[in-house]
Image: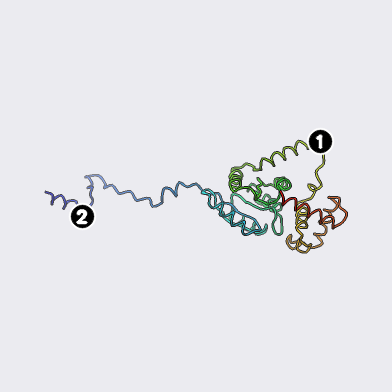
Amino acid sequence: MVLLMARKLIAPGPLLKSQPGKKASRRAEPDLEPRAERDLPAKSRIFIVDDHAMFREVLRQLIDHEPDFNVCGEAADAAEALRGIRESKPDLVIADISLAGASGIDLIKSIKSEYGELPVLIVSMHDESLYAERALRAGAMGYVMKQEPAKSVKAAIRKVLGGDMHLSEKMVSAVIARFMRGTTNQTASPMETLSERELEVFRMVGQGKPVRQIAEEMKVAVPTINSFRNRIKEKLHLKTSTEVMLHAIQWVRGELAR
């Protein structure tokens, strides 16, 4: 009897015989795609723009370590960034204020002009009290200083991707205070009267860079830089180019000491 049962188990043919008038049921084909991969949400694509390769690498590692983020490209200057953004189609651009050639402020304006709603988050070493409002006016959705811990940068990224603006508590208080003072006759400080390009020249003068180097980095002619310096001198009520240089050095040192 046992031998007979064994012969039936190893006999060729289907284990389930079809009944008369009915088709034999087919086995379901296995789903080769792992369920975990199917259930994963799409990652947010982030493009990094910074003129320091080491910082780009650190930021890339920080972002790629998150399960819902992915760095889709990077660039060292505004021109390279605009080309990369066209190709990679990111969900968010992270940029610095200081870039070779056009500044981060100029890049924000270009992105807003070409891509409209593409959000931009500024991550910069420059003091937010002077640059954050300029970045927001240009169209940025947030500002984070590089001195902030990694968790603050990640929180800012998620906030901006969610459609909200991000500023530090200190900067929010300053913006509100400035708005309240706007109803009075108080005037802006001389530094706030400088345009983005003038402020960029002023910063590089304070870093001790010669005029020709500034012109090369901003990709403009030397006479253009001299024109910027003359306008800076007028707006800051300074008499000589030497005073402009000394004032710029003092301002840069104060910015670094914050």
The residue that appears at 70% across and 55% down in the rendered structure is 98
Residue 173 in percent (x, y) is at 70, 38
Give the labeled residue for mark 2.
12
Badge 1 or badge 2: first in the primary sequence: 2
Going by the numbered disc 2, the residue's amino acid type is: Pro
Count how many numbered circles sit on residues in the image: 2
Q: Residues within 10 Å of mark 1 (few under 14, many from 20)?
A: few
Q: Nearer the viewer, mark 1 or mark 2?
A: 1
The answer to whether 54 is drawn above or below residue 135 in the figure is below
- Could one spot residue 87 in this view of the protein? no
The residue that appears at 75% across and 53% down in the rendered structure is 253
Viewer-closest of 60 and 94:
60
Going by the numbered disc 1, the residue's amino acid type is: Thr
Give the labeled residue for mark 1.
184
Tell me if label 1 and label 2 are in contact, CB under 8 Å: no
- Label 1 sits on a secondary structure element that is loop
